[in-house]
Image: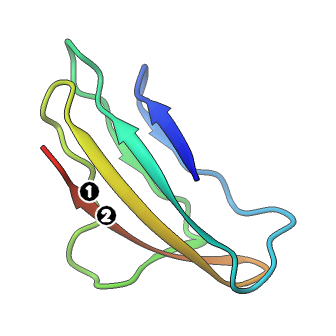
Amino acid sequence: NFSHKATENTTTGAPTNMVAGQSGVILYTQHASAAKTLAFNAAWVLITGTNGTVTTTLSGKSMIFYSTFDASTVLYDVRNLT
């Protein structure tokens, strides 16, 4: 499990040293005065196909749930808390 405070526009990296079945949650906190973007590397595959965007609410929070499908693919979903 991880947390990340947005300070700039960011793209997730491709996974390295992953083992199928690893999973976790990332708490993403939006910047307090200027919303930042979070893009996902092509190795990250959205589970539902509908909600892959983190909140743009200033100081808002999003939970990114992820699970590794294999050594190079991460399945994920985003739930915005605010």
Q: Residue at x 87, y 66 (%)?
A: 17
Residue, disc 2: 78
Q: Where residue 67 appears, x then y in whole percent?
A: 57, 77
**Is residue 31 toward the left or the right of residue 59 in the image?**
right
Element type where label 2 sits in the image: strand
Coloring scheme used: rainbow
| Circle 1 residues within 10 Å: few <14, some 14–19, many ≥20 | some
Disc 1/disc 2 C-alpha distance (Å): 7 Å
**Is residue 3 toward the left or the right of residue 13 in the image?**
left
Quarter where residue 48 is shown: bottom left
Residue, disc 1: 53
Q: Where residue 55 appears, x then y in whole percent?
A: 20, 45
Element type where label 1 sits in the image: loop
Extreme residue toward the right, this view: 17
Quarter where residue 14 is shown: bottom right
When the figure is inspected, residue 8 is found, relative to residue 15, above or below; the finding is: above
Answer whether labels 1 and 2 touch (C-beta < 8 Å).
yes
In this rendering, the label closer to the viewer, 1 or 2: 2
| Circle 2 residues within 10 Å: few <14, some 14–19, many ≥20 | many
Q: Where residue 72 appears, x then y in whole percent?
A: 74, 77
User: Considering only order in the chain, which callout, 2 or 1, is on the residue closer to the N terminus?
Assistant: 1
Q: Residue at x 79, y 80 (%)?
A: 71
Q: Residue at x 42, y 51 (%)?
A: 39
